Image (cartoon, grey):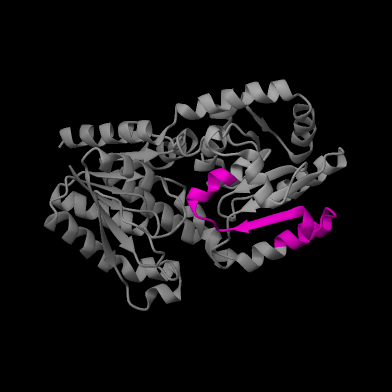
Protein backbone atom coordinates (compact mmCIF):
# COMPACT_ATOMS: atom_id res chain seq x y z
CA UNK A 1 0.00 0.00 0.00
CA UNK A 2 1.27 3.46 -0.91
CA UNK A 3 0.52 6.37 1.43
CA UNK A 4 1.42 10.05 1.11
CA UNK A 5 2.09 11.86 4.39
CA UNK A 6 1.64 15.62 4.76
CA UNK A 7 3.23 16.13 8.21
CA UNK A 8 2.57 18.84 10.78
CA UNK A 9 6.07 20.30 10.40
CA UNK A 10 9.37 19.78 8.61
CA UNK A 11 10.01 16.04 8.42
CA UNK A 12 13.72 16.64 9.12
CA UNK A 13 13.03 18.38 12.43
CA UNK A 14 14.54 16.60 15.46
CA UNK A 15 11.31 17.09 17.42
CA UNK A 16 9.51 13.72 17.68
CA UNK A 17 6.13 13.62 15.94
CA UNK A 18 3.63 10.78 15.98
CA UNK A 19 3.62 10.33 12.20
CA UNK A 20 7.24 9.16 12.30
CA UNK A 21 6.49 6.53 14.91
CA UNK A 22 3.19 5.29 13.47
CA UNK A 23 4.26 5.09 9.86
CA UNK A 24 7.71 3.82 10.79
CA UNK A 25 5.89 0.77 12.17
CA UNK A 26 3.69 0.49 9.06
CA UNK A 27 6.74 0.75 6.79
CA UNK A 28 8.14 -2.32 8.55
CA UNK A 29 5.00 -4.17 7.44
CA UNK A 30 5.55 -3.35 3.77
CA UNK A 31 3.75 -0.04 3.38
CA UNK A 32 5.44 2.38 0.97
CA UNK A 33 5.45 5.79 2.66
CA UNK A 34 5.86 8.99 0.65
CA UNK A 35 6.50 12.16 2.67
CA UNK A 36 6.01 15.77 1.61
CA UNK A 37 8.86 17.64 3.27
CA UNK A 38 8.43 21.33 4.14
CA UNK A 39 11.80 23.06 3.86
CA UNK A 40 11.56 25.51 6.75
CA UNK A 41 14.27 27.90 7.90
CA UNK A 42 17.01 26.34 10.04
CA UNK A 43 15.37 22.93 9.82
CA UNK A 44 17.77 21.09 7.55
CA UNK A 45 18.73 18.59 10.23
CA UNK A 46 20.62 15.53 9.05
CA UNK A 47 18.53 12.44 9.39
CA UNK A 48 18.69 8.90 8.12
CA UNK A 49 15.67 8.00 6.00
CA UNK A 50 14.44 4.60 7.19
CA UNK A 51 13.53 1.82 4.74
CA UNK A 52 10.10 2.19 3.20
CA UNK A 53 10.14 6.02 3.22
CA UNK A 54 10.51 8.27 0.18
CA UNK A 55 10.90 11.96 1.04
CA UNK A 56 9.86 14.63 -1.48
CA UNK A 57 11.27 18.07 -0.62
CA UNK A 58 9.34 21.17 -1.72
CA UNK A 59 11.42 24.34 -1.30
CA UNK A 60 9.59 27.66 -1.33
CA UNK A 61 12.23 30.24 -2.39
CA UNK A 62 12.73 33.10 0.12
CA UNK A 63 9.45 32.39 1.95
CA UNK A 64 10.97 30.45 4.85
CA UNK A 65 13.18 33.42 5.73
CA UNK A 66 10.06 35.51 6.27
CA UNK A 67 8.64 33.21 8.92
CA UNK A 68 6.64 30.02 9.16
CA UNK A 69 3.22 31.62 8.61
CA UNK A 70 4.38 33.40 5.43
CA UNK A 71 6.02 30.17 4.30
CA UNK A 72 2.75 28.24 4.44
CA UNK A 73 0.68 31.04 2.88
CA UNK A 74 3.04 31.68 -0.04
CA UNK A 75 3.79 27.99 -0.37
CA UNK A 76 0.14 26.90 -0.65
CA UNK A 77 0.05 26.68 -4.48
CA UNK A 78 3.41 24.89 -4.55
CA UNK A 79 2.27 22.44 -1.88
CA UNK A 80 -1.00 21.87 -3.75
CA UNK A 81 0.91 21.15 -6.95
CA UNK A 82 3.40 18.90 -5.14
CA UNK A 83 0.68 16.86 -3.43
CA UNK A 84 -1.11 16.42 -6.76
CA UNK A 85 2.10 15.41 -8.54
CA UNK A 86 3.21 12.91 -5.88
CA UNK A 87 -0.29 11.44 -5.51
CA UNK A 88 -0.67 10.86 -9.25
CA UNK A 89 2.90 9.99 -10.24
CA UNK A 90 3.39 7.59 -7.32
CA UNK A 91 -0.19 6.29 -7.54
CA UNK A 92 -0.78 6.60 -3.82
CA UNK A 93 -3.73 4.77 -2.32
CA UNK A 94 -4.37 7.30 0.45
CA UNK A 95 -3.19 10.63 1.84
CA UNK A 96 -2.72 11.26 5.57
CA UNK A 97 -2.33 14.92 6.54
CA UNK A 98 -1.49 16.59 9.85
CA UNK A 99 -1.28 20.22 8.78
CA UNK A 100 -3.58 23.20 8.27
CA UNK A 101 -3.09 24.92 4.89
CA UNK A 102 -1.25 21.96 3.32
CA UNK A 103 -4.01 19.81 4.82
CA UNK A 104 -6.57 21.86 2.91
CA UNK A 105 -4.50 21.34 -0.24
CA UNK A 106 -4.44 17.58 0.40
CA UNK A 107 -8.22 17.49 0.88
CA UNK A 108 -8.73 19.33 -2.42
CA UNK A 109 -6.50 16.87 -4.29
CA UNK A 110 -8.24 13.95 -2.63
CA UNK A 111 -11.69 15.23 -3.50
CA UNK A 112 -10.86 15.98 -7.13
CA UNK A 113 -9.01 12.71 -7.85
CA UNK A 114 -11.05 10.46 -5.55
CA UNK A 115 -8.12 9.64 -3.26
CA UNK A 116 -9.13 8.98 0.36
CA UNK A 117 -7.71 11.57 2.75
CA UNK A 118 -7.37 11.00 6.49
CA UNK A 119 -6.88 14.07 8.69
CA UNK A 120 -4.62 13.19 11.63
CA UNK A 121 -5.38 16.31 13.67
CA UNK A 122 -2.65 16.15 16.29
CA UNK A 123 -3.44 19.51 17.95
CA UNK A 124 -5.95 22.34 17.91
CA UNK A 125 -4.11 24.25 15.17
CA UNK A 126 -6.03 27.58 15.35
CA UNK A 127 -4.71 28.00 18.89
CA UNK A 128 -1.14 28.02 17.60
CA UNK A 129 -1.52 31.65 16.53
CA UNK A 130 -0.37 32.49 20.05
CA UNK A 131 3.01 31.04 19.13
CA UNK A 132 3.68 33.94 16.79
CA UNK A 133 4.01 37.69 17.28
CA UNK A 134 0.48 38.52 16.19
CA UNK A 135 -1.09 41.74 17.52
CA UNK A 136 -3.70 40.84 20.13
CA UNK A 137 -6.55 42.58 18.29
CA UNK A 138 -5.89 40.39 15.23
CA UNK A 139 -6.04 37.09 17.11
CA UNK A 140 -9.86 36.60 17.12
CA UNK A 141 -10.43 37.24 13.37
CA UNK A 142 -7.36 35.23 12.36
CA UNK A 143 -8.41 32.35 14.60
CA UNK A 144 -11.84 32.35 12.96
CA UNK A 145 -10.16 32.12 9.54
CA UNK A 146 -8.07 29.16 10.69
CA UNK A 147 -11.14 27.52 12.19
CA UNK A 148 -12.89 27.88 8.83
CA UNK A 149 -9.93 26.24 7.06
CA UNK A 150 -9.94 23.44 9.63
CA UNK A 151 -13.70 22.95 9.27
CA UNK A 152 -13.59 22.81 5.46
CA UNK A 153 -10.67 20.37 5.53
CA UNK A 154 -12.23 18.09 8.14
CA UNK A 155 -15.52 17.87 6.23
CA UNK A 156 -13.73 16.97 2.99
CA UNK A 157 -11.73 14.12 4.54
CA UNK A 158 -12.93 10.52 4.66
CA UNK A 159 -11.83 10.25 8.29
CA UNK A 160 -10.63 12.60 11.03
CA UNK A 161 -8.32 11.23 13.73
CA UNK A 162 -7.40 12.91 17.02
CA UNK A 163 -4.95 11.66 19.68
CA UNK A 164 -7.25 12.66 22.56
CA UNK A 165 -10.94 12.32 23.41
CA UNK A 166 -11.10 15.98 24.43
CA UNK A 167 -9.86 17.17 21.03
CA UNK A 168 -12.20 14.70 19.35
CA UNK A 169 -15.12 16.16 21.28
CA UNK A 170 -14.14 19.70 20.26
CA UNK A 171 -13.83 18.70 16.59
CA UNK A 172 -17.18 16.91 16.63
CA UNK A 173 -19.03 19.79 18.30
CA UNK A 174 -17.48 22.60 16.25
CA UNK A 175 -16.81 21.10 12.85
CA UNK A 176 -18.36 17.70 12.16
CA UNK A 177 -21.62 17.62 14.16
CA UNK A 178 -21.48 13.81 14.17
CA UNK A 179 -19.18 10.90 15.03
CA UNK A 180 -19.49 9.16 11.67
CA UNK A 181 -15.95 9.70 10.45
CA UNK A 182 -14.26 10.74 13.72
CA UNK A 183 -11.77 8.39 15.40
CA UNK A 184 -9.56 8.70 18.48
CA UNK A 185 -6.19 6.98 18.07
CA UNK A 186 -3.86 7.88 20.95
CA UNK A 187 -0.18 8.68 21.03
CA UNK A 188 2.17 5.98 22.20
CA UNK A 189 5.67 4.92 23.17
CA UNK A 190 8.31 2.39 22.23
CA UNK A 191 8.49 0.38 25.48
CA UNK A 192 11.68 -1.33 24.35
CA UNK A 193 13.52 1.99 24.16
CA UNK A 194 11.80 3.67 27.10
CA UNK A 195 12.50 0.82 29.48
CA UNK A 196 13.73 1.29 33.06
CA UNK A 197 15.50 -2.04 32.82
CA UNK A 198 17.75 -0.84 30.01
CA UNK A 199 19.03 2.34 31.65
CA UNK A 200 21.17 2.56 34.79
CA UNK A 201 19.52 5.26 36.91
CA UNK A 202 22.61 5.82 39.06
CA UNK A 203 24.87 6.12 36.02
CA UNK A 204 22.44 8.61 34.47
CA UNK A 205 22.50 10.71 37.62
CA UNK A 206 26.29 10.62 37.80
CA UNK A 207 26.44 12.02 34.28
CA UNK A 208 24.19 14.85 35.42
CA UNK A 209 26.39 15.52 38.43
CA UNK A 210 23.68 14.79 41.01
CA UNK A 211 23.54 12.25 43.83
CA UNK A 212 21.01 12.64 46.64
CA UNK A 213 18.95 15.50 45.16
CA UNK A 214 15.38 14.92 44.02
CA UNK A 215 15.30 15.73 40.30
CA UNK A 216 12.12 17.30 38.97
CA UNK A 217 12.15 16.94 35.18
CA UNK A 218 10.32 18.49 32.27
CA UNK A 219 10.81 17.05 28.78
CA UNK A 220 9.52 18.73 25.63
CA UNK A 221 9.38 21.89 23.59
CA UNK A 222 9.17 24.98 25.82
CA UNK A 223 6.09 26.53 24.28
CA UNK A 224 3.15 28.83 25.01
CA UNK A 225 1.02 25.96 26.35
CA UNK A 226 3.23 25.42 29.42
CA UNK A 227 2.50 26.86 32.86
CA UNK A 228 6.01 27.90 33.91
CA UNK A 229 4.79 29.42 37.16
CA UNK A 230 3.46 25.98 38.18
CA UNK A 231 6.90 24.47 37.54
CA UNK A 232 8.83 26.91 39.71
CA UNK A 233 6.20 27.17 42.44
CA UNK A 234 6.11 23.37 42.69
CA UNK A 235 9.92 23.22 42.97
CA UNK A 236 9.91 25.98 45.58
CA UNK A 237 7.19 24.20 47.57
CA UNK A 238 9.19 20.96 47.63
CA UNK A 239 12.19 22.82 48.97
CA UNK A 240 9.97 24.49 51.54
CA UNK A 241 8.96 21.01 52.73
CA UNK A 242 12.61 20.15 53.36
CA UNK A 243 13.23 18.27 50.11
CA UNK A 244 16.49 19.08 48.33
CA UNK A 245 15.21 19.36 44.78
CA UNK A 246 16.54 20.55 41.44
CA UNK A 247 14.77 21.24 38.15
CA UNK A 248 15.90 19.61 34.90
CA UNK A 249 14.67 21.14 31.63
CA UNK A 250 15.08 18.96 28.53
CA UNK A 251 14.09 20.87 25.39
CA UNK A 252 14.30 24.25 23.74
CA UNK A 253 12.02 27.10 22.71
CA UNK A 254 12.23 27.33 18.90
CA UNK A 255 9.63 30.12 18.76
CA UNK A 256 11.13 32.45 21.37
CA UNK A 257 14.08 31.20 23.41
CA UNK A 258 14.88 34.74 24.59
CA UNK A 259 11.36 35.22 25.93
CA UNK A 260 11.44 31.84 27.70
CA UNK A 261 14.82 32.65 29.25
CA UNK A 262 13.40 35.95 30.49
CA UNK A 263 10.41 34.15 32.02
CA UNK A 264 12.67 31.60 33.71
CA UNK A 265 14.95 34.31 35.14
CA UNK A 266 11.93 36.18 36.47
CA UNK A 267 10.52 33.05 38.14
CA UNK A 268 13.88 32.14 39.65
CA UNK A 269 13.90 35.54 41.31
CA UNK A 270 10.24 35.25 42.39
CA UNK A 271 10.81 31.88 44.08
CA UNK A 272 14.35 32.54 45.36
CA UNK A 273 16.02 29.95 43.16
CA UNK A 274 19.56 30.14 41.81
CA UNK A 275 21.31 28.98 38.66
CA UNK A 276 22.60 25.90 40.50
CA UNK A 277 19.00 24.80 41.09
CA UNK A 278 18.35 24.41 37.35
CA UNK A 279 19.86 21.83 35.00
CA UNK A 280 19.22 23.07 31.45
CA UNK A 281 19.93 20.30 28.94
CA UNK A 282 18.56 22.12 25.89
CA UNK A 283 17.49 20.26 22.77
CA UNK A 284 18.78 16.68 22.76
CA UNK A 285 18.35 13.80 20.30
CA UNK A 286 15.26 11.75 21.06
CA UNK A 287 17.36 8.64 21.59
CA UNK A 288 19.06 10.43 24.53
CA UNK A 289 15.77 11.15 26.32
CA UNK A 290 15.32 7.73 28.07
CA UNK A 291 18.59 8.13 29.95
CA UNK A 292 17.66 11.65 31.06
CA UNK A 293 14.22 10.51 32.26
CA UNK A 294 15.93 7.66 34.11
CA UNK A 295 17.81 10.25 36.16
CA UNK A 296 14.59 12.02 37.19
CA UNK A 297 12.51 11.34 40.29
CA UNK A 298 9.46 13.37 39.28
CA UNK A 299 8.28 14.11 35.73
CA UNK A 300 6.13 17.15 34.98
CA UNK A 301 3.21 17.82 32.64
CA UNK A 302 2.67 21.49 33.51
CA UNK A 303 0.08 22.53 30.92
CA UNK A 304 -1.88 25.77 31.18
CA UNK A 305 -5.57 26.47 30.55
CA UNK A 306 -5.31 27.18 26.79
CA UNK A 307 -7.43 25.11 24.39
CA UNK A 308 -4.27 23.65 22.84
CA UNK A 309 -3.09 22.44 26.25
CA UNK A 310 -6.43 21.19 27.54
CA UNK A 311 -7.17 19.10 24.43
CA UNK A 312 -3.76 17.45 24.36
CA UNK A 313 -2.52 14.01 25.33
CA UNK A 314 1.24 14.38 24.85
CA UNK A 315 3.72 11.72 23.80
CA UNK A 316 5.81 12.44 26.88
CA UNK A 317 2.99 11.17 29.12
CA UNK A 318 3.52 7.68 27.69
CA UNK A 319 7.31 7.99 27.82
CA UNK A 320 7.17 8.97 31.50
CA UNK A 321 4.79 6.07 32.22
CA UNK A 322 6.95 3.59 30.33
CA UNK A 323 9.94 4.58 32.47
CA UNK A 324 7.80 4.03 35.58
CA UNK A 325 8.19 7.61 36.77
CA UNK A 326 6.08 9.57 39.23
CA UNK A 327 4.10 12.09 37.18
CA UNK A 328 2.91 15.46 38.45
CA UNK A 329 0.45 17.23 36.18
CA UNK A 330 -1.85 20.18 36.06
CA UNK A 331 -5.45 19.05 35.46
CA UNK A 332 -5.69 17.76 31.86
CA UNK A 333 -8.73 15.73 30.79
CA UNK A 334 -7.00 12.96 28.85
CA UNK A 335 -4.06 12.65 31.22
CA UNK A 336 -6.60 12.10 34.00
CA UNK A 337 -8.43 9.51 31.90
CA UNK A 338 -5.29 7.48 31.24
CA UNK A 339 -3.18 8.00 34.37
CA UNK A 340 -5.54 9.17 37.10
CA UNK A 341 -4.57 6.36 39.47
CA UNK A 342 -0.81 6.82 39.07
CA UNK A 343 -0.35 10.56 38.47
CA UNK A 344 -0.60 13.37 41.00
CA UNK A 345 -2.77 16.16 39.61
CA UNK A 346 -3.69 19.58 40.93
CA UNK A 347 -2.13 22.95 41.64
CA UNK A 348 1.49 23.45 42.69
CA UNK A 349 0.65 23.54 46.41
CA UNK A 350 -1.50 20.39 46.57
CA UNK A 351 0.80 18.35 44.35
CA UNK A 352 3.91 19.26 46.37
CA UNK A 353 2.26 18.06 49.59
CA UNK A 354 1.20 14.77 47.99
CA UNK A 355 4.60 14.20 46.39
CA UNK A 356 6.33 14.79 49.72
CA UNK A 357 4.24 12.03 51.30
CA UNK A 358 4.78 9.70 48.33
CA UNK A 359 8.57 10.08 48.37
CA UNK A 360 8.68 8.81 51.96
CA UNK A 361 7.05 5.48 51.03
CA UNK A 362 9.59 3.42 49.06
CA UNK A 363 7.41 0.30 48.85
CA UNK A 364 4.49 2.26 47.45
CA UNK A 365 6.80 3.95 44.94
CA UNK A 366 8.11 0.59 43.67
CA UNK A 367 4.62 -0.84 43.20
CA UNK A 368 3.38 2.33 41.49
CA UNK A 369 6.34 2.23 39.09
CA UNK A 370 5.29 -1.23 37.87
CA UNK A 371 1.68 -0.06 37.50
CA UNK A 372 2.73 2.93 35.38
CA UNK A 373 4.86 0.70 33.16
CA UNK A 374 1.93 -1.66 32.64
CA UNK A 375 -0.29 1.23 31.56
CA UNK A 376 2.32 2.32 29.00
CA UNK A 377 2.53 -1.18 27.53
CA UNK A 378 -1.07 -0.80 26.34
CA UNK A 379 0.00 2.15 24.20
CA UNK A 380 2.99 0.82 22.26
CA UNK A 381 3.59 2.46 18.88
CA UNK A 382 3.20 -0.95 17.25
CA UNK A 383 -0.36 -1.30 18.58
CA UNK A 384 -1.18 2.33 17.74
CA UNK A 385 0.16 1.79 14.20
CA UNK A 386 -1.92 -1.36 13.81
CA UNK A 387 -5.03 0.60 14.75
CA UNK A 388 -4.15 3.37 12.29
CA UNK A 389 -3.37 0.86 9.54
CA UNK A 390 -6.74 -0.82 10.06
CA UNK A 391 -8.42 2.58 9.72
CA UNK A 392 -6.63 3.19 6.40
CA UNK A 393 -7.78 -0.20 5.11
CA UNK A 394 -11.39 0.45 6.18
CA UNK A 395 -11.30 3.88 4.57
CA UNK A 396 -10.08 2.41 1.28
CA UNK A 397 -12.83 -0.21 1.33
CA UNK A 398 -15.44 2.57 1.44
CA UNK A 399 -14.37 4.14 -1.87
Q: Quadrant of the N terminus?
A: top left
Note whether 69 is above or below 190 in the view shown: below
Residue 382 x/y as whole percent: 36, 34
Residue 317 x/y as whole percent: 55, 38
Residue placed at 66% from the left, 57% from the top? 280
Specify whether 227 is left or right of 312. Answer: right
Image mark count: 0
Residue placed at 75% from the left, 32% from the top? 355
Rendering quarter of residue 303: top right
Residue placed at 72% from the left, 59% from the top? 264
Residue 304 in view, yes or no: no
Residue furthest to the bottom in view is 62
Specify whether 177 is left or right of 304. Answer: left
Residue 321 in view, yes or no: yes
The answer to if 108 sits in the magenta stretch is no
Residue placed at 53% from the left, 42% from the top? 316
Residue 141 x/y as whole percent: 49, 60
The answer to if 268 sits in the magenta stretch is yes
69 or 349, which is in the foreground? 349
Specify whether 114 is left or right of 324. Answer: left
Note whether 303 is above or below 179 in the view shown: below
Rendering quarter of residue 69: bottom left
211 or 293, which is in the foreground? 211
Specify whether 359 is left or right of 341. Answer: right
Instruction: Give the magenta part as a residue range.
Output: 263-291
Rendering quarter of residue 297: top right
Note whether 387 is above or below 20 in the view shown: above
162 or 216, which is in the foreground? 216
Q: Quadrant of the C terminus?
A: top left
Residue 281 x/y as whole percent: 62, 57
Amino acid sequence: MRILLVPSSDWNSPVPVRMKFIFGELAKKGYQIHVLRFCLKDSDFPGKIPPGFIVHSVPVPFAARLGEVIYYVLGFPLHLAAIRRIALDCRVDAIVTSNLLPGLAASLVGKFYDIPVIYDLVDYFPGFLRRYRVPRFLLPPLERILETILSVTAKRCRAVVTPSFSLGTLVRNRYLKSDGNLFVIPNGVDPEIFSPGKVDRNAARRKLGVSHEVIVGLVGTLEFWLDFDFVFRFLSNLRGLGITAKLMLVGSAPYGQAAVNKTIDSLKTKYSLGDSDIIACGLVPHEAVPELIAGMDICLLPFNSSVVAQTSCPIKLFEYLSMGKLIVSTPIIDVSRIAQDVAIMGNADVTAERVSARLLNANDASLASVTRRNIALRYSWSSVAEEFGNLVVRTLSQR
